Image: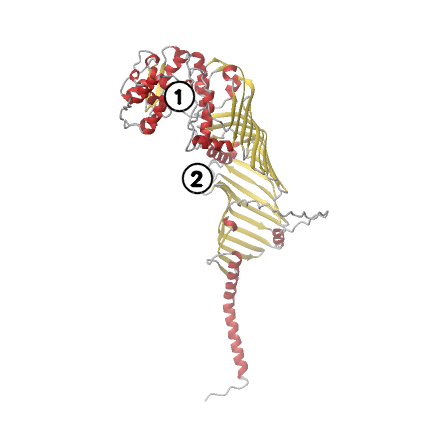
Amino acid sequence: MPEAATPRSFPRAIAWCLGLSLTGAAAVGPALAEAQVQSRLRERFGVDERFAIDLDLGGLELRGLSRALPGERGHVSAGHVRVRPTFDGLVIEIEELDGVVGRRQSKPAPPKSATPVTPAAKTDAPAPSPADPVAEFLQRFRGVRVELVTRGRLSVELADGVSATARDPHFVLSGDGQIHGDLDLDLGPSGGPTWTRAAIEVRAADSQPRELEVSGSLALGRSGEGHEPATADAELVFNGQISPRAVALDVHQGDEHGGSASVSVARGAGQDLVRVDADELPLKLLEPLALLFGHQLADALGERDAELDLDAAQLSGAVELERGSGRTLARFDAVELRGLRVDSSLIAGHPIELSSLTLDGQVGREHTESGPRNFGALVLGHGDVQLGVEAQLDADGVSLDLRLPRAPCQTVFDATPGISPVLAGTELSGELDAHIHLSIEFAALEQARARYLGADAEPLELETFEAPGELHFELPYLERCAVDRLGPGTDIEGLRGPYHHRFVSAGGRDKRRVLALGDDDYVRLSRVPKVALAFVILEDARFWTHDGFDREQIERAFWFNLLEGRVSRGASTISQQTARSLWLGNDRSVARKLAEAMLAAELERGLDKRRILEVYLNVIELGPEIHGIAEASRYHFGKEPGELELIEALHLASLAPAPVAYSRRFASGQIDQQWRQHLRRQVRRLRIRHLITAAEAEEAMRVSLDLQTH
């Protein structure tokens, strides 16, 4: 029979229960604490369920940290964060850091309130400087050494497709109020190879942590593989100060005889000012930035194959950028680029070197009540020639003025970049000045598009066309400049007699022809009056009266292309096309067009119109490796050119703008209704201009077009 409980046994039972409770609390307490901390940290930092925390005598470890940034600007994550004590302080280790920070999206301006805003009362007392929370936090560690060791990367988007990536940043708070740090910073396309790597050292005081002293070096060069610049030997050294209000950096080439530059940034109340002063700074060192600008410009112009060669290029002068109060202004003061080489099919068909390119003036952008307004006034110089440019673009329209001050014709010729090699050695006399003015009203442009390109479009004839602006150009080259000697690559004198011409086909096949009687593929103009008539009406209606340039056709082509929003119509005369076929090839560069115009002027001066037209008809491309009307007549119709009917001659002339493409279009021997209507329209043009009779027009309409199949 059990003993009854005595009063002495109760204290023992209570002690036993209390001991059991304390033991349980000691075992479960840390787990409950960790769970509570994890729960609160998830709420505070927005981490996901992978987040975990360990706390022991070795320190604190956080795992699975991940946070999306506000506004969908990116994310930051870390696999492990360890905080451990040492004999002289703390070590914080961050492993597997991965972060991407996008650019902040500009917010639309808030609507104007109809309620008047009462201005704040003025006071003479200066506003107290707000305390820096970062400084207050860092100063709490005075007397304790704290080392932050990071392994990973943090990328910040600087522009579309371009990012700066900090790798393995390392910082030390020494405990005496000083902060030291170092990091590698990579610049390049997002997700692509590195253009630039900077090794940066940072120093600051914990009382002013945003006032940094920086120094280091930048390895700059053309993109390499992986994350290393390809030309690590190209190096800039820099040092200076960076703060939220100002930046002052001195940059110089690694060796003592290299170029240098100073960079300053000042930030004020709503206004920023950036200035760069360079002195013979090799542009090779800035190649990544130059490549970025070049690619952006090429995209704007629709070109993809441009290349810049900066090996020998140097930059001098000052560039200043001012921004604030709804206005941005860029000023260029005696900026000079020397030794820049450009390979661009837009400029020339071969690489060119700009020996000395200068830039003075300013461009800007400001916000007005009607919208943004862009404006600029620049003086561009190359060699001994300067070109003035003034432009404005706003919501109403655009205006552009180009002015070439009077200069010797030879000087202008020598300063023209990329001039064709066939003109090398050309000598000119006389003096030349020029002025081109263009203004376009956007409202009138839309009205013109509806009128001339809409469903009920009117024929776009220059005589009745109402331009949505004004185009005016004065370029009196023919009146002011005389050619004393053409380069040896051309022989206009030889065209007066038998001329040996060499064709090189697209496939590289070499073919020669003598432009005179006796050559089986040469045709005299007098034998093909219908063919001559067809080519003149379609390619150069004012051929017999102009001086090599059809200024009215140039204006018409400009407005037509502007209305369509693409280049679909040219303005080259038969004289210009003859020069191109004889000496220049088919590249579409600006340099080729200038050479074409110059040689056309010399053809007009040296030959009569009939000889120019005769040469043209015997060298023009009219099919795949088909040159001249003799080959073209046999290829397309199986007959000699003198046997062609008018409608057949008009078909050949209509092939001239795209001979290979059109030949493929009609390789089956059949034409479509659209092409048939085009040919009939040309017959009506000839009749309206009284170049053929009504009977001849009616006969031409009845002729069927029997093409050869290929």
Q: Position of residue 255 (x, y in %)?
A: 55, 33
Q: Secondary structure at mark 1?
A: helix
Q: Secondary structure at mark 2?
A: loop
Which residue position is annotated with label 1? 539
Out of 474 and 335, give the one closest to the viewer. Answer: 474
Location of residue 511 by image quarter: top left
Location of residue 689 by image quarter: top left
Give above or below for 537 relative to 148: above
Task: Identify which amino acid the numbered label 1 is placed on.
Answer: Glu
Rendered image coloring scheme:
secondary structure
Quarter of the image containing the N terminus? bottom left
Quarter of the image containing the C terminus? top left
Which residue position is annotated with label 2? 225
Q: Is residue 426 visible?
A: yes
Q: Residue furthest bottom?
A: 1
Q: Residue furthest front?
A: 694
Q: Position of residue 571 (x, y in %)?
A: 43, 23
Q: Is residue 565 visible?
A: no
Q: Position of residue 115 (x, y in %)?
A: 63, 48
Q: Position of residue 443 (x, y in %)?
A: 51, 33
Task: Identify which amino acid the numbered label 2 is placed on.
Answer: Glu
Q: Which mark is residue 336?
A: none
